[in-house]
Amino acid sequence: MISVLYVDDEPDLCAASSRLLSQKGFVVDTCTSVEDAFLVLHKKTYDVIVSDYLMPRMNGIDFLVEVRKNYGDLPFIIFTGKGDEDVVLRAIEYKADSYVRKNCDLKTLLTDLAFTIENVVEKYQAKKNLEHSLKKLRHAEEIAGFGHWEYHPDTGMVLLSHGTQNICGLSGDEWPYTEFLSFAPPELEQKISYLFHTLITKGEPFNVSHQIHRKTDGKIIYVQSLAEYDIDANVVFGVMHDVTEQYIAQQALLESEEKYRFLVTNALEPILIVDMQGSILFANSAALKLIEGDEIFSFIGRNVIEFIAPASQKDVIRDFVEVSQGHDAYVAEYDVITAKGRRVTVESIGKAIRYEGKKADLLSLRDITDRKQAQEALRRSEEQFRSFVEHANDVVYSLSKEGLFIYISPNWTEFLGHVPEEVIGHSFTEFVHPDDLPVCTSFFYSVTHTEKKGSGVEFRARHKDGVWKWFSSTASMIHDVNTGNLVYLGIAHDISERKKTEEALRKASNQINLMNSITRHDILNKVTVILGAIEVAELECLVPEISHYFDIIENATVAIQRQIEFTREYQDLGIHEPFWQNPEQIIGNLQVPKNVTIENHVHHVSIFADPMLEKVFYNLLDNSLRHGKNVTHILVTGTDRPDGFMLSWEDDGVGVGAEEKELIFERGHGANTGLGLFLVREILALTGISIHETGKKGSGARFDMCIPKGAYSVTI
C-alpha cells in the first residue's frame, strides 16, 4: 500500500481527501501546515507527499525546496489552482514529480490525484529499481573486471559503462568512435576497425584480445573484447574484460615453463620422464651421461627396466605400481647397469605428472656410487675404530653437556671394575676424588664452552673396590654420528704407576736434600773454622813471604763457601710444582735502595712459573745494583705479542757489551759469584720462558723475558 502525506491548510479538505484516498487503498496522514509536516517527516517515511501551493508562512514551492534539501528525490505532487501556469513552471523547475489542478468537482479531483499518485510512485520505484540494478551491475563489473559498451554507427558514438570507463581510464560515458579506437596501439587500430566492419557487414564474430593505453596513468592494459551486431537497432553491443592479470600470469607461466625446460634439460642431476609402462619419453644430458650413452634419441622409447640390475628390477616394478596409484615422492635406491656394462647405484625420487597430455612418471636420479663406497669405507673404519677402542690400553668415554656418561669403552671394567650399567647415565663427579673435582670441573667446562681440545688434566678415579687410581685425560667436543649433537669425548690414560714413581722420586729427593742440607751445614762449619784459623795465623805470622799464601788459601775457602751456599738455592729448583704468580706483587715486595726507583707498568698479568720466580726478580735487581754502577731508575714493561708475552726489565746503568750478552748467563761468569743470572735462566726455563739481554752498551741493561702462550694470562 502507498503511504501518502497530505498537506493543506484547509482542515475540511484534508479530512475529505483523506477519506476518499483511503477508500482507494492509500494510507493517508494529513497536516494543515508545513511545520507540522516536517515534524511528521522526522518520525515517519512516506512514499509520496501531496501539498497545496497556497498556505500561510510557507507555500508549496518553498516546501518542495526544503524537501529536496532534506529528503532528496522523495516523490512530491503539488496542487495548483486553475490558470496558475507560473506555479506549474516553478514546480517543474524545482523538480516536482507532478502537479494537479484544483477544480470544483472534489471527487474528480481526488480521482485524478489518485491516478497521479500511483503513476508518480510507480515511476519512482522503477527509477530506484533501475538505479539499484545499475549499481549491482557496476559493482559486478568492478569485481569481475568487466565493462560493456554500445557502438551506434548512425551517430558514430560509443557509449561506455562505468566498468569500461574504469578499464580504459576514462571519464564520461559517450565517446566518438575514432577516439575510442585510438586507445589501442596504432598497429592494432586497423585490425579492430576491420573487425567492426566485418561484424556489421558480414556478421562475422568479433572476439579480439588486444592492448589499450589507459588514459589515467598510461599503463598498458590487456583486454578481451566480444561484440554482437543488432541489425534491427543498428547497434553493436560489446563486452570488454580486463585480462591483464591473466595475461601476466600466462606470460609468467610460459616463462616458468621455458625455465623449467631449460633447468631440466641442463640440470646436473639426471632426470627421466617415463610412461606408466616404463618407456623412456624424455632424458636430459645428465641422464645420458649416467647411462653412458652416445645420443639421447637412441634411448627414447626403450624401457627403463633394460638398465636396471636384476637384483633391483622387482623394486622398480613395485615402485612404478606405487606411483601409478598416487603414492609418489619417496626416495628409493637401485643398482643400474650402464650402456657400457658398469654397475652404479642411484638414488631416485619419482612423482606422477602429466606429460604431453598423458600420465607419466618424473624420475630425479642421483649417482650415489661414491657415497655408498664412502659409507662402506666408513663402516669398515668404524669397525676398526671400535676394535681399537675395545683393545686399547686407554679408557675412551663420552659425556653429555651435563656431565653424564653416555659411553664408556669396554676396558673401563678392566681399569675401574664397574660394568657399563653402573656408569652410563651417572655424573663424572661420582667417580672423581673430592680433592680433584675443582680442576676436573674447570677442565670440563673449559672444553664444553670453548669447544677447544683440552689435555693434561690429572685426577684420581675411584675403583669399584674403593681404591683410587690416577689418570691423565685429553678431551674435545665432537658431533655424535647418531644425533648430530656435540658431545664431550675423552681419552684417559692410567698414570698410577707414574705417580707412584714420582712419589718415590720425590721421597728420594727429599732424603737427598736432607742429606745435602746436613752435609752443607757440616762443611760450612768447617769452612768457618778454616777462615777463623787463617785470620789468627795472619795475625801471628811475621814472615811477609808466607802471608801471600794465606791470601790464596782464604780466597779459595771463600769460593768454596759461596759454592756451598749456592747449592742451598739450586737444590730446590724444579722440586715443587709450578703455579700462577703475579709479577706485579713480586716486584712490589723487592727491597729497593732509597736512591733507586722502580717504575712498573705490568698490571693484571699472571705467569705460570716455578715457585722460585721471586728469585728471578731478586737477582735481576741485584745484577742492576752490582753491575750497573750508577743505576737510579728501573723500568718494567710488558707487551702482549702474537708469539707470547714479552716482559722487560730495563735499568739506566752502564749496560752490557755485545761480546758478553750470552756469557753473563753462564755459570761462574762475572765479577761476583757468577751464579745469579745463570740461576735466573734455569728457573725461567722450567716453564718454557726464555730470557735475553738486548740493551745497548752505555744506555743500560735490558732483559727481555718471552713467556709462551698458555703460560700467562691477562685480565682486565
Image: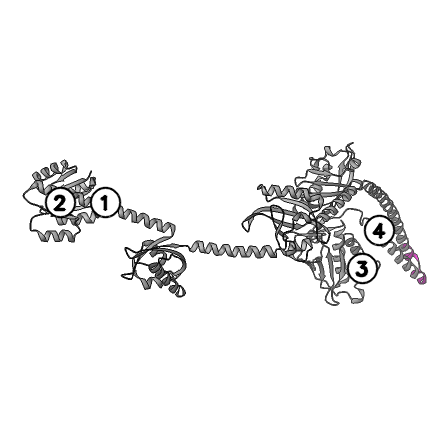
> Distance of mark 4 from mark 3, alpha carbons?
17 Å
Amino acid type, label 4: Thr
Quarter of the N terminus within the rendering: top left
Q: Residues within 10 Å of mark 4 (few under 14, many from 20)?
A: some
Q: What kind of colouring is applied to the model shown?
A: one colour
First in sequence: mark 3 or mark 2? Answer: 2
Q: Quadrant of residue 8?
A: top left
Residue 326 appears anywhere in the view: yes
- Labelled disc at residue 665: 3
Q: Nearer the viewer, mark 2 or mark 1?
A: 1
Say whether residue 64 is left or right of residue 196: left
Amino acid type, label 3: Phe
Name the magenta segment's main secondary structure: helix
- Labelled disc at residue 125: 1
Q: x and y percent of residue 515 in the render?
A: 87, 45
Q: Residues within 10 Å of mark 3 (few under 14, many from 20)?
A: many
> Distance of mark 3 from mark 1, alpha carbons?
122 Å
First in sequence: mark 2 or mark 1? Answer: 2
Say whether residue 230 is left or right of residue 617: left
Over which residues does the magenta segment extend? 536-547
- Labelled disc at residue 51: 2
Compared with 427, 236 (above or below) is below
Element on which disc 1 rests: helix
Q: Residues within 10 Å of mark 2 (few under 14, many from 20)?
A: many
Q: Nearer the viewer, mark 1 or mark 4?
A: 1
Residue 49 part of the magenta-drawn span? no
